[in-house]
Amino acid sequence: MTTFADLGLMPGLLSAVRDAEYETPTPIQEQAIPIALTGTDVLACAQTGTGKTAAFLLPLLQRLSQSDRKGVRALVLTPTRELAAQIAESARVYGKHSRLRSAVVFGGVSLGAQIAQLRRGVDLLIATPGRLLDHLERGTVSLSGVNILVLDEADRMFDMGFLPDVRRILRLIPKERQTLLFSATMPKEVEHLAHETLKSPTTITIGRKTTPVESVRQVLYAVESEQKRDLLSHLLAHGHMRQVLVFTRTKIRADRLTKHLAQCGRRVAALHGGKSQGARTEALNSFRNGGVDVLIATDLAARGLDVDGISHVVNFDVPNTPEDYVHRIGRTARASATGDAISLVSSDEVSFVREIERVIGGVIPCQVVKGFEPGADTLRRFERTETSRSARMASGAIRRFTPRGRGLRRSA
């Protein structure tokens, strides 16, 4: 069995890894760390929840520690505030036995404190593209000394429209550098960016490009759209769902669902782009420390959220792209744990489910909860090309279930 010591990490990093109670490297860490330590460019595609952050931070911190140069020497670009903050915290944990200084800059907060920190000197800068451009335009940071660049969640940066900003930033970084590009999926636009940016990279692929981790148990619930709120309340009350992340399509739906669940007595909070940074941080911290056990989020959190112990991810609204589905459900079953992904599917979302199944290469089991059975017209929409869902229900392939214990069992 490979250990972190086998990967060539220095004693200080190994001590930090032990303190963080990491026992063995994940496949992406085992493959990426030794290569990145040599200074080679890396193009890595791995599912969410597989340990990509440590895979690039540990070799980055080691290479920085081996140089006496000053100023910003390493830059990590990432799409969301939450992910930037979490990478910064990981850098603090892994680098606690070094003298390296890191800083994180993202929007939604005052520039003043960030400027003050940058002026005190920084070795590693973690940033979202828009806020980094703000600092570059103000002259409060220079990237002329960067010799290690990490593009994290590159596909999400494309989804969020950040690639033009990323390309502007790339023009301000020395061409002689090491570049590490990490992504959960590899759409053509990201492949083009990799071709433009990396030099003779080593390519690492963990799993298929758009496949959920195997330890996530997936299930669909066929339900009428207007019954979704009550079905979710029912599942939360009876399904032993300990720490639940619920995704909605819009901020308004997130707020309305949060209000509904609060009225039902749930400890619930909302997390979306309409909240101030302070409110978002408070909601996330409350979710982490158990102050709330249900967090309602938009896709803002699909990539940036890294919370241990999420038992269930619920797609209150089915995402309209398979990639977003994979990213969402990857919030559970992290670090080799197991988890459950539940999708509440109304008739107008069946086409999204078909595309998700086509891309992930498998059929997601479909169930109906007693008391929340959809009408015959809705069930007909669940027909598949090869076998209708109504026929599958008649044959027992789609069964009526009621929550009981951790899983879901056939009702009498």
Image (spheres, rainbow, N blue to C red):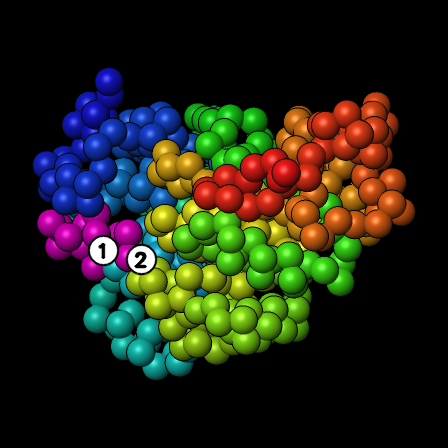
Q: Are marks 2 and 1 in contact (CB under 8 Å)?
A: yes
What is the C-alpha distance between the residues marked 2 and 1?
A: 6 Å
The answer to whether 143 appears left or right of 272 in the picture is left
Vertical comparison of 343 with 390: above or below: below
**Could you tell me residue 143's position as x and y percent?**
38, 58
Give residue 284's quadrant in the image: bottom left
Q: Which residues are magenta?
A: 88-101
Label 1: few (<14), some or many (≥20) within 10 Å?
some
Question: Which three-letter amino acid code belongs to the residue tagged 2?
Answer: Ala
Q: Does residue 42 appear in the picture of this structure? A: yes
> Where's residue 2, x and y in %?
24, 21
Image position of 45 (left or right of 308): right
Q: Residue furthest front?
A: 412
Q: Secondary structure under badge 1?
A: helix
Magenta segment includes 91: yes
At x 38%, y 73%, the residue is: 282
Instruction: Note whether residue 194 is visible.
Output: no
Q: SS for tag 2?
A: helix
Verify whether residue 15 appears in magenta: no
Residue placed at 71% from the left, 27% from the top?
A: 397
Residue 162 or residue 306, whichever sits in front? 306
Report the quarter where the C terminus lies. Answer: top right
- Can you tell which mark lies on residue 92? 1
Residue 44 pos. (x, y %): 46, 33
Disc on res. 88: 2
Rendered view: 58 above or below 160 = above
Amino acid marked by disc 1:
Arg
Where residue 252 sits, quadrant-wise, is bottom right
Q: Residue at x 50, y 39 (%)?
A: 407
